[in-house]
């Protein structure tokens, strides 16, 4: 794990995911469905070239297809760290 994510807390990221992301993304092994238009967190983590730091920075910027919720840097890092837990080794 890279330097800035070492302090990230995946457990706190899970809480954020369950609050903000479940309406579109499958964010856990127990969730059955998000929307057909969005990838699961596991699919995001398994993308070629996945980089949790880059994802954390991506999450800080508003995106037209995602709801406009403002994350702090720590929250973005925590959410990204949680998504990274789905990466197959």
Image (cartoon, rainbow, N blue to C red):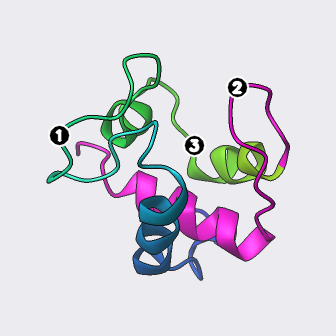
Where is residue 12? Give x, y as percent: 48, 79
Magenta residues span 61-89
Q: Which mark is residue 51?
A: 3
**Among all residues in the image, which is located at the extreme right?**
61
In terms of sequence position, does the residue under pointer 2 or pointer 1 come before the other?
A: 1
Which residue was labeled with disc 2? Answer: 65
Which residue was labeled with disc 1? Answer: 32
In terms of sequence position, does the residue under pointer 3 or pointer 1 come before the other?
A: 1
Q: Is residue 78 left or right of residue 39?
A: right
Residue 78, placed above or below residue 63: below
User: Splitting the image into 4 quarters, where does residue 69 fall?
Assistant: bottom right
Residue 27, placed above or below residue 24: below
Disc 2 to disc 1, C-alpha distance: 22 Å
Residue 63 appears in view: yes
In terms of sequence position, does the residue under pointer 3 or pointer 2 come before the other?
A: 3
Disc 2, SS: loop
Residue 73 forms part of the magenta stretch: yes
Residue 33 forms part of the magenta stretch: no
User: In which quadrant is the C terminus drawn?
Assistant: top left
Disc 3 to disc 1, C-alpha distance: 25 Å
Where is residue 58? Give x, y as percent: 75, 42
Rate crowding at label 1 as few (under 14), some (14 to 19) or many (20 or more) other CA atoms within 10 Å: few
């Amino acid at each position: 794990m890279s330097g800035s994510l070492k302090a990230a807390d995946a457990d706190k990221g899970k809480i954020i995911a369950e609050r903000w992301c479940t309406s579109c993304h499958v964010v856990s092994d127990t969730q059955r469905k998000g929307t057909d238009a969005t990838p699961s967190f596991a699919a995001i983590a398994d993308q070629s070239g996945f980089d949790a730091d880059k994802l954390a920075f991506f999450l800080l910027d508003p995106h037209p297809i995602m709801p406009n919720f403002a994350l702090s840097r720590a929250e973005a890092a925590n959410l990204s760290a949680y998504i990274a837990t789905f990466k197959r080794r």
